[in-house]
Image: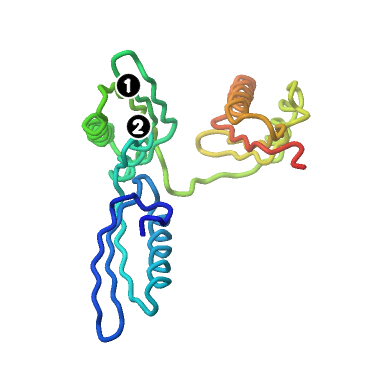
Amino acid sequence: MERVEGVVKGSAELRTRFVGNRPYVEIKLATPRGGSLESAHRLSEVVEKTIRAELANAEATVHVEPTAIPNESAAAGIRAIADRLGLRVHNLNIYSLAQNLRVELDLELPDSLSLREDHRHSEAFERVIAGELSERVEITVHLEPRSDQPRPAVRQQKMTENVRNVVLGLPQAADVRIHDVLLTDEGLVVTLKRAFPGHTSLRETHEEMSELERTLKSLIPELARVHIDPEISNPH
């Protein structure tokens, strides 16, 4: 079982028995934490097939437990903690200082919660992170409202033309095209597609998209959000 990709070495616990002529196998194993429930389910299916390949007609029961592995990165550990607490995080950045680690992240919470409730989730999250990381750690959490419900939006041709005229005036206009412009209760939400050479690094791509977003927001005050979908300019 421990040769199966995704199974932590030394974690497998087996119990076997026969019922009549049929072998029954119960196995408990560990997988690195931070994975999804779907990936754990796929892993259990692979293990079951492996057991049946070794023991014809075997009935297998697999229990997968997420676990912290040796040399687990701080980022993986923090994401796993968030998942365990039912929280969502993004923009996770970790800095190594002389005496400690500094963790900065955005914590998404339902926009229906009060600030007091938000802080309760944030403080509980910070306590678990500080308790699990072996290094001294400073934690900065930015609270970000999240709505899981569809929000009203409309398309208007005039707004789309206005945004297109602004985009056409930019130096990088040849690589940018407008996919959609929506009017929402927050303001305008613009989705663009921008072409990049396939060899461009993800860091460069993100920096250029961020610069484009800042430029558009300075030129169009009504903009609430800009989504930019990077495409490969020469896929072949």
Q: Which residue is mark 2?
A: 74
Residue 114, picture quadrant: top left
Mark 2 Cα shell of 10 Å, populated few (<14), some (14-19), many (≥20): some
The answer to whether 28 is drawn above or below residue 182 in the figure is: below
Position in image of residue 129 (x %, y %): 27, 32
Please tell me the numbered disc located at residue 182. Answer: none
Q: Residue at x 31, y 52 (%)?
A: 30
Instruction: Work out whether residue 129 or residue 59 is closer to the camera in this orientation and state it.
Output: 59
How many numbered marks, from 0 up? 2
Position in image of residue 40 (x %, y %): 38, 56
Res. 134 in view:
yes
Position in image of residue 104 (x %, y %): 37, 25
The residues tagged by marks 2 and 1 sit, at their Cα atoms, a distance apart of: 9 Å
In the shown orientation, is residue 141 left or right of residue 116? right
- Image quarter where the N terminus lies is bottom left
Q: Residue at x 39, y 31 (%)?
A: 106
Please name the amino acid that badge 2 sits on: Ala
User: Are the two marked residues, 2 and 1, in contact with CB atoms closer than 8 angstroms?
Assistant: yes
Q: Which residue is mark 1?
A: 101
Residue 13, picture quadrant: bottom left
In the shown orientation, is residue 50 left or right of residue 18? right
The extreme bottom residue here reads: 20
Please name the amino acid that badge 1 sits on: Leu
The answer to whether 62 is drawn above or below residue 8 in the figure is: below
Position in image of residue 156 (x %, y %): 67, 41
Mark 1 Cα shell of 10 Å, populated few (<14), some (14-19), many (≥20): some
